């Protein structure tokens, strides 16, 4: 196994994901972390990931995550679920310049395949967690590692609804269940359950939704003032787009909300539109059916531009 070969030569390891971590980012970073802790206790491993929803803290090791890179030099740095150094979270991009060896495990179609010394990138995979699973020795995967990877797969497949879900994905899930994974608790507590204020904010956004292109596009946005009104943070809005996506008859879903002085763009499509291509127009990327970016435009202007790009594809 490539991962075991790499780990056998390391004494210190740093693990990074992308900015604004989602379930797959957290799942894949904690997946490799738990694998190391279980099988290589002599290795000093640390996960550096930005703040994520409290519900993800049911995964072992989440309480030990550092939210800011501290400048340490390491033998080995993992870059998980991240296709560019610009998107490395926790200010960790600098680590990859100084680490003795680096490894990128990802599934984004926009990945250039040359970020690290070893690049294991499978765009056809459902998630970075799925990619990671097939690089590990199954016999050495513990329940803690399985829980981590299951979290990642659940979130990047939309609880197995998205088109990225394959037979290979479900075979991996079956193997994780055999490890005793807490599948019911993970899927309920981290994917379907919201806090009260998240429920209120999601309902508010749903009321603001508008249709475009004869109902093929549904879009909405939230302002800084509205986020303050609901006392809600950006990570707590990460699943709103999946609720908006439930509007029947739509092909593309667009949701914008402020992050660090810009508006984060989240996009999803069902069958036809390549939202990754649209995201690239905003310096972002992702997958054919799920992608995002950032913009300094006013949300109304950004949505208008996105709808025009969708219309060209349709």
Image (cartoon, rainbow, N blue to C red):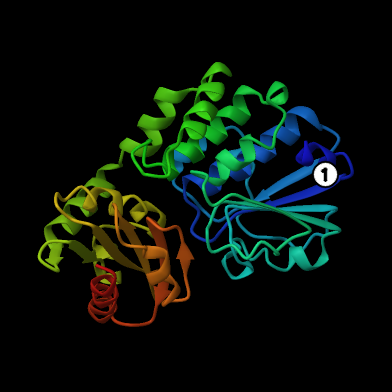
Q: On the rendered structure, is 169 left or right of 230?
A: right
Image position, residue 104 (x, y; %): 68, 54
90 or 115, nearer to the observer: 115
Image position, residue 231 (x, y; %): 30, 58
User: Can you see residue 179?
Assistant: yes
Circle 1 crowding by C-alpha within 10 Å: few under 14, some 14–19, many from 20: some
Q: 172 above or below 113?
A: above
Q: On the rendered structure, is 36 left or right of 201?
A: right
281 or 241, nearer to the observer: 281
Q: Which residue corresponds to the image point at 61% horizontal and 61% vertical from the top-left? A: 90
The answer to which image quadrant residue 279 occupies is: bottom left
**Dot 1: element:** helix
Check disc 1 and report the residue beneath it. Answer: 6
Q: Which residue corresponds to the image point at 41% horizontal and 61% vertical from the top-left? A: 291
The answer to which image quadrant residue 303 occupies is: bottom left
Image position, residue 56 (x, y; %): 48, 39
Q: Which residue corresponds to the image point at 19% horizontal and 61% vertical from the top-left? A: 218
Image position, residue 171 (x, y; %): 52, 27
Q: On the rendered structure, is 243 left or right of 295?
A: left
Q: Which residue corresponds to the image point at 12% horizontal and 61% vertical from the top-left? A: 215
- The quadrant of the picture occupied by the N terminus is top right
- The quadrant of the picture occupied by the C terminus is bottom left
Count the marks: 1
């Amino acid at each position: 196994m490539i991962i075991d070969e790499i780990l056998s030569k390391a004494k210190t390891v740093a693990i990074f994901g992308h900015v604004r971590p989602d379930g797959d980012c957290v799942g894949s970073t904690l997946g490799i972390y738990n694998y190391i802790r279980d099988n290589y206790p002599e290795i000093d491993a640390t996960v550096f990931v930005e703040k994520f929803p409290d519900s993800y803290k049911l995964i072992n090791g989440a309480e030990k995550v550092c939210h800011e890179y501290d400048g340490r030099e390491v033998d080995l740095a993992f870059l998980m679920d991240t296709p560019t150094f610009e998107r490395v979270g926790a200010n960790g991009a600098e680590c990859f310049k100084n680490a003795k060896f680096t490894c990128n495990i990802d599934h984004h179609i926009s990945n250039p395949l040359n970020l690290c010394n070893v690049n294991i990138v499978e765009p056809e995979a459902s998630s970075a967690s799925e990619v990671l699973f097939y690089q590990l020795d199954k016999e050495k995967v513990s329940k803690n590692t399985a829980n981590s990877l299951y979290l990642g797969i659940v979130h990047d497949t939309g609880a197995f609804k998205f088109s990225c879900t394959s037979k290979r994905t479900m075979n991996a899930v079956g193997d994780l269940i055999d490890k005793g994974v807490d599948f019911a608790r993970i899927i309920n507590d981290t994917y379907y359950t919201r806090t009260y204020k998240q429920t209120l904010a999601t309902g508010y956004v749903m009321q603001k939704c508008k249709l475009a292109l004869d109902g093929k596009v549904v879009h909405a946005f939230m302002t800084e003032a509205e986020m303050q009104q609901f006392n809600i943070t950006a990570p707590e809005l990460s699943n709103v787009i999946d609720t908006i996506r439930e509007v029947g008859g739509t092909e593309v879903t667009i949701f914008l909300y402020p992050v660090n002085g810009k508006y984060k763009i989240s996009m999803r499509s069902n069958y036809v539109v390549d939202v990754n291509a649209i995201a690239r127009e905003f310096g972002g990327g992702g997958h054919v059916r799920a992608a995002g970016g950032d913009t300094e435009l006013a949300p109304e202007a950004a949505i208008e531009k996105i709808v025009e790009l969708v219309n060209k594809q349709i």
